[in-house]
Image (cartoon, rainbow, N blue to C red):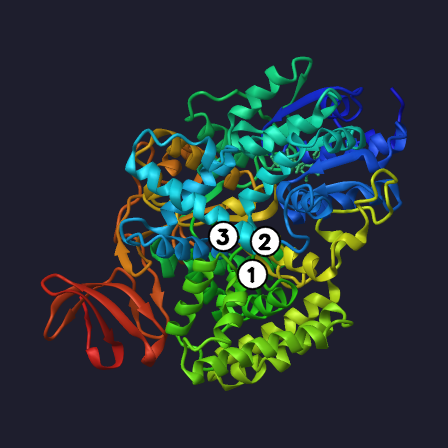
Amino acid sequence: MEVSYILDGLNDFQRQAVAAPSGSYLILAGAGSGKTRVLVNRIAWLIQTQNISPYSILAVTFTNKAAAEMRTRIESMLAMPVRGMWIGTFHGIANRLLRSHWQEAKLPQNFQILDADDQLRLIKRVIISLELDEKKWPARAAMYFINSHKDQGLRPGNIEDYGDIYIKTNLDIYKSYEQACQRGGMVDFGEMLLRAHELWLNNSTLLKHYQNRFSNLLVDEFQDTNTIQYAWIRLLAGANDNIMVVGDDDQSIYGWRGAKIENIQLFGSDFSNSETIRLEQNYRSSGNILQAANELIAHNPGRLGKQLWTDSDDGEPIKLYAGYNEIDESRYIVSCIKEWSDQGNPFKEAAILYRSNAQSRVLEEALLRLKIPYRIYGGQRFFERAEIRTVLAYMRLISNRGSDAAFERIVNTPTRGIGDKTVQNIRQLARHRDVSMWQASISLVDSTQLTNRSRNAIDVFIQLINSLDELTKNCDLSELCEIVIAQTGLQSYYEKEKGERGQARLENLKELVTATKTFDPEQIVSFDPLNDGTNGSETAETQTLLDDFLSHAALEAGEGQGDLSQDCVQMMTLHSAKGLEFPLVFLSGLEDGLFPHQMSMQEPGRLEEERRLCYVGITRAMKKLVLTYAESRRINGSETFNRVSRFIEEIPRELIEEVRLRGNVIQPPSGLKPFKKNILAGNIEGTGLTLGQTVMHNKFGEGVVVNYEGEGKQARIQVNFKGEGSKWLMLAYANLQPL
Ligand code: ATP
Ligand code: MG
């Protein structure tokens, strides 16, 4: 084995994996054991000591951000830029392939990517056009039907309906949807993978070309690959038998989206010469945190089984806080972050994780109150905001008139007198003639079907798009973007929108222009701009920068938002926290019904996946872990009283320190459920009242203070009255007497 500094600092097992001779390897290891590090070092090692050309390496990561990080780390390790290597997500790589081989893939060159939202809208339109009752055949269910079949590689022709009306109808929707996509040159996320797979299946020359080219394959987070992704990888690996996958069955959290843990076992049998390497030392977390994670996950049956140990200290106990309600919970979390920052630690080292996106709002409010900067990672994506989508739709329609999704979005935005009925007419004609809505509207302008006014309005729209197309022929991306914003009237449309909202929209539009200026297509999937000399199809010209940018907007899964160098608290769902690590981690909302999620509590398989999600959450923490829950929670408009999450009870008591407000710390009595109401008291600033306090009201009688908003004289207090139920009262007028 050649010795290289790339192997320095690795343990024996890691070194064995990094410097393994060519062949197939499964690195099976728990959280924080250096799996990703092994992949990074292996790539550097292959290039440096084995003279492997970066050009022959393909690495798959779970997010675009992870891909970018991996590239940076490899380059800094080798102290030189690495060109020609493909690192990206399955979707990013599939996109690149389809763009290079659009003809073979039977797609228009400028095909458009439908994100989940676009897809749902399109399916809705298909359901309407099939004259099905939307209530009986909800678009969401059809979308699930379509996506889950695509994830398994199944087209309508491969699905048997067994005379079942449910399957039959959904198949009809699937078929019509497929036609609509093909007509408009649109592919959804599942379609990208399926097409990329079929591209190779149906074209052995092309497959051979890529098998020869990518003779070194590496896959991170392998436990979350779905059927089609695995099939794709297997096909590419072919007879080369030179592939390294790393994964952790305990961190498989995307089963609900088609991921198959079973792929780990399949790998062993499909690659019969493969070798399994286990990494058992955890380098990330303190002893207590790791033990909590180990004990929790031990409750799952049927694991592949791993021993994970650390030689770090036990560290601090895990903190547990019972909030009176979600507001109190958030306030506690934010006070901890304040303390953390006062001790001289950066905000960005703190992460708040939650099960459901809806939890973030209250947390955000608490952060805003203390003026603590934060960033939501993967929350509402920048590219999903209404005004951004609108501008992108203009850019899209300019590039591809066949995009019905874009057409519908902007035909009357900003308003130009094209009503729903007119749009309905256009839609019907398009369906009837099997043409795009754009084409249908051109024919309508020349017909007598519509009123003069509607015809004029459509004509104005058509002229606008055509003239923008003409005007921007030689523009760069950001000029195009600026022209669209100014000339379509969007700028003045949002300027008229009152208050902060319109202001925020205008700021977002500016941000979009910045994004087009700084856009670098290399970021999506690295791509060698030099021709590889084989068939000439992989040149940069096959793809315009605009199409690249639009793909980027669709694929960028709300990952890096804003300026990464800014020091902000990191907020994200547990699902998006995979692979990351932070010195201070909060797991919030640990209540049965929220986490584990209500939907998962009936099905045993689902509960196990929730437990894995909790394992992922706990193992993100390096030094400090804080678990919180709320005794009552208002979420999605209704108030619930849930019991504490079973996951907390699965963590040994001795690892946990229960926190009370005002810095009191009490150990929960062992064996006993320590989570009782009323013990907890939270001062309501400037009112002399505390949460949980019993009060008397002249009219409503006796009640308990359960919630509040605002402070001092302005405070509104929610009281749960014995006879009258819960009421919100202005404190200044309520004349409450403490009891
Ligand atoms: P996850 O399962 O969460 O994806 P992982 O197995 O990919 O985790 P890494 O992220 O690669 O683990 O590593 C976890 C942390 O441990 C990182 O901070 C990494 O730098 C550190 N680490 C890994 N191996 C070593 C080592 N041999 N010596 C010191 N630190 C290490
Ligand atoms: Mg990792």
Query: Up-down: is 619 above or below 460?
Result: above
Out of 101 and 721, give the one closest to the viewer. 101
Place residue 657 in its image quadrant: top left
Find residue 417 and name its label. none
Q: Residues within 10 Å of mark 1 (few under 14, many from 20)?
A: many
Out of 215 and 433, give the one closest to the viewer. 433
> Could you tell me which residue is drawn at 44 percent across and 84 percent down?
452
Query: Residue 625, position in %: x, y?
Result: 51, 44
User: Label 2: which residue?
Assistant: 185
Gap in angstroms between the C-alphas marked 3 and 2: 8 Å
User: Label 1: which residue?
Assistant: 403
User: Label 3: which residue?
Assistant: 180
Amino acid type of the residue that numbered disc 1 sits on in the rendered structure: Ser
- Asked which secondary structure carries label 1, the reply is loop
Gap in angstroms between the C-alphas marked 1 and 3: 10 Å
The answer to whether marks 2 and 1 mark residues whose Cβ atoms lie closer than 8 Å is yes
Residue 393 visible from this viewpoint:
yes
Left or right: residue 693 versus residue 304 is left
